[in-house]
Image (tube, grey):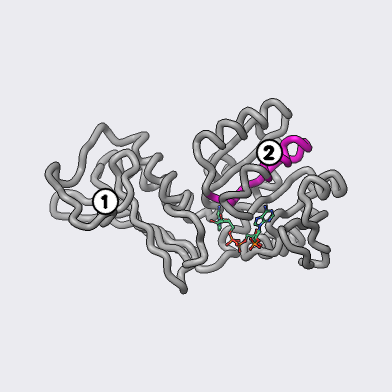
Amino acid sequence: MIKVLVNGALGRMGRTVCAAVNADSELELVGAVDVVEGSVEGHTVETNLDAALKKFQPEVMVDFTRPNAVFGNVMTALENKVSPVVGTTGLDADALQKIRDAAEKNSTPAFIAPNFALGAVLMMLTARKIAKYMPDVEIIELHHDKKLDAPSGTAELTAKMISEVRLKHSQGHPDEVERLEHVRGANVDGIRIHSVRLPGFVAHQEVIFGGLGQTLTIRHDSMGRDSFMPGVVLACKKVRGLKGLTIGLDKILD
Ligand code: NAP
């Protein structure tokens, strides 16, 4: 049994992860942490991560907290030689480098996935393939209105994956003018990302390719938070066998 502690255990994702860990025969939920006290899946929720890691001695800490807290949580886990499995988005390149260094220094593997849903990973891999042939592309991501950061980590990673393969390319009209600020969305390596935040959505993304007289759209919809659970469970099982920092669910799929 792999011992797992869940951080952010009282949140929307945290509660779902606690149930998924409890339901898996190879994982054992040994502790739960959040900023406020409570209980989840029969565990009393602790409020001090460092103390809880020392008390419960997990092998893995799953983190679904907040963009402003995740970096400190991951560093605390690594200092305790506990492997972080991170779903919280919002880590920038500088933070990722520091995590990479800390994982190596502490000889403790770490895993981060901007999206734990298998279908979303397949969408990103497919988008990368299509972009070789149809390099004009824009991304629309749609999430619930409680999401704190924009764009989504998935949209940003999709844009990065596309720009790895498409030839140097400038799209849109060179004389285009934005008459309203940001109306054309964010620009990641020349790819526009548009973020929608509305009640009713969970996590959705469209990647739209345009070509001569045709468009091609691929779309992924997470209908509920359970869509992320097989990926989280898989990462908990695989993380201790990895080295340093691994980013992306595609890296651990067979
Ligand atoms: P949420 O419902 O707000 O849950 C976050 C929980 O963490 C809350 O209970 C929050 O408490 C708690 N928290 C805040 N700071 C903390 C800290 N320092 N230590 C411990 N707990 C802390 O949010 P969510 O919808 O579950 O999403 C959590 C994160 O996961 C977001 O960044 C979201 O974008 C990301 N996400 C990723 C994936 C993926 O596949 N990678 C999928 C879905 C969501 P308070 O409410 O009191 O602050």
Is residue 48 covered in magenta? Answer: no
Q: Position of residue 100 (x, y in %)?
A: 61, 31
Image-quadrant location for residue 19:
bottom right
Above or below — where is 183 with respect to 61?
below
- Say few, some or many: other residues with alpha carbon within 10 Å of mark 2 (under 14 / 14 to 19 / 20 or more): some
Residue at position x 71%, y 46% from top?
237
Residue at position x 72%, y 33% from top?
108
Above or below — where is 172 with respect to 143?
above
- Mark identifier at residue 90: none
Q: Position of residue 52 (x, y in %)?
A: 82, 50
Q: What residue type is labelled 2?
A: Met
Task: Look at mark 2 in the image and give the residue it sits on.
Answer: 75
Q: Considering the image in quadrants, where does the C terminus appear?
A: top right
The alpha-carbon separation of the residues under discs 1 and 2 comes to 39 Å
> In the drawing, does residue 115 fall left or right of residue 16?
left
Q: Where is residue 42 in the image (x, y as percent from the top left)?
A: 82, 67
If you read the primary sequence from the N terminus, does the residue marked by circle 1 or circle 2 appear first?
2
- Say few, some or many: other residues with alpha carbon within 10 Å of mark 1 (under 14 / 14 to 19 / 20 or more): many
- Please state the quadrant of the image where ligand 1 appears: bottom right
Q: Where is residue 93 in the image (x, y as percent from the top left)?
A: 50, 36
Task: Look at mark 1 in the image and give the residue it sits on.
Answer: 209
Above or below — where is 222 with respect to 90?
below
Q: In this view, which residue lies farthest toward the bottom?
A: 200
Image-quadrant location for residue 11:
bottom right
Q: Is residue 133 visible to the viewer in this orientation of the structure?
A: yes
Q: Which amino acid does label 1 sit on?
A: Phe
* Foreground tag (1 vs 2): 2
Q: What stretch is highlighted in magenta?
A: 73-89
